[in-house]
Image: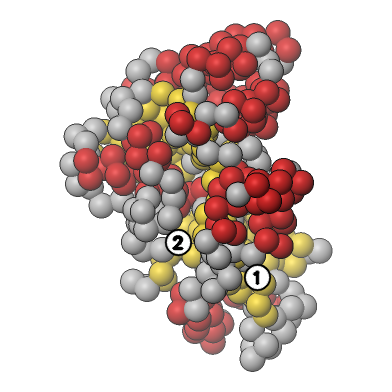
Amino acid sequence: MADYKSKLNELLLVAAQQNASDLHLGVGRYPTLRIDGKLIPLGQESVLTPEAAQNLVFGLLTPEQKEIFLKEKELDFAYSFEDKARFRINVYYQRGYAAAALRLIPSQIKTVEELNLPPQLHDFTRLSQGFVLIVGPAGHGKSTTLAAMLDEINHNRNEHIITVEDPIEYIFTQDKSIVSQREVRIDTSDFHKALKSILRQDPDAMMIGEMRDSESIATALTAAETGHLVFSTLHTNSASQTIDRIIDSFPAEQQGQISSQLAATLVGIVSERLIPRVKGGRVPACEVMITNAAIRNLIREKKAYQIDLVIETSAQEGMINLNRSLAELVKVGEISLENAELYSLNPAELRLILERS
């Protein structure tokens, strides 16, 4: 087992040194890195046998975590590798064998500028109340963007920020704010229990790691309604789809009330994609929706499908259409047209924008 522990440390170090976003361990394949969105097998390593995969996976777990994993067959947790790197890890079984997906979490929290994100995101961090959502596919920078925005509040405002995460990803160094970070299974027994008690902990701003179900959405809306600034994430592709997803999470008889709450509290949605750069690395393309009177009416009337048009025609208010963000990156030579079309939700519209510009 000691040999496997040193092999595990070696693989974690390689992932950190090569600036990988993820490391995958599973039976019948080489340990594999994801770098700039592409899976790259470590061909110099041995293909993992059932014994090797299990020992590497178990090497990540405490005795308590191992007990939970064997019972529940999957587990999320954070893992610090000496002082070199921190990982968000999901261990699971596939075809009866142990496997793991390890997401590398940078030790430094970058700023909005360092992440090449739109300056409109600064405006959301200056609000005293409201509901802000960061959305997009898995692995496209939602947690990193949220961390940048919360850290901006931390450095500029005298607030109490509470996060509920499963697991904790970025570690905040308290500056002007008090930052209370709560991890499921370590600081609270249950995600929903933590959300129920969060309003009794005197927060100014809060971050809910992920909107998992109608209960977590309802808590977020109530918090925003009662004078708090609430940040969260969803795995959706656009602002309009996000609004539909939230409302559709509730039974038909509650949807009218939820639409009204959402219209009253939602201040913005940022939809993000990380696109491979021509010169290597990845760069964000974003849709930014800033809630105005027209959007509030569309939410109340359950006409979210018309929000795309409002975003497209409201650039003067700071809104950004995803295709225009992609087109700008193509024009300045940051990304290829092929990749822009791949990540666009409407490639025909994208080509039209590029032809006219």
* In the foreground, 264 or 52: 264
Decide: is 231 above or below 69: above
* Labels 1, 2: front one: 1
Q: Is residue 114 left or right of residue 46?
A: left
In the orientation shown, which residue stands out farthest toward the front? 356
SS at circle 1: strand
Residue sitting at 23 percent across and 45 percent down? Answer: 155
* Residue 17 horizontal/vertical position (percent): 45, 79
* Residue 188 horizontal/vertical position (percent): 43, 38
* Residue 349 horizontal/vertical position (percent): 72, 43
Which mark, by number, is residue 12?
none
In the orientation shown, which residue stands out farthest toward the right? 95
- Which residue bears the numbered disc 1? 38
* In the foreground, 84 or 248: 248
- For badge 2, the amino acid type reads Ile
| Pointer 1 local density, CA inside 10 Å: few below 14, some 14–19, many at least 20 | few
Residue sitting at 64 percent across and 91 percent down? Answer: 44
The number of callouts visible is 2
Decide: is 128 above or below 78: above
Mark 1 and mark 2 lie on one chain; the one further toward the N terminus is: 1
Colouring mode (rainbow / by chain / secondary structure / one colour): secondary structure
Residue sitting at 57 percent across and 29 percent down? Answer: 313
- For badge 1, the amino acid type reads Lys
Residue 62 visible in rendering: no
Q: What is the C-alpha distance between the residues marked 1 and 2?
A: 17 Å
* Residue 2 horizontal/vertical position (percent): 51, 84
Pointer 1 and pointer 2: residues touching (CB < 8 Å)?
no
Residue 287 visible in rendering: yes
Residue sitting at 65 percent across and 70 percent down? Answer: 38
- Which residue bears the numbered disc 2? 105
SS at circle 2: strand
Q: Quadrant of residue 161?
A: top left
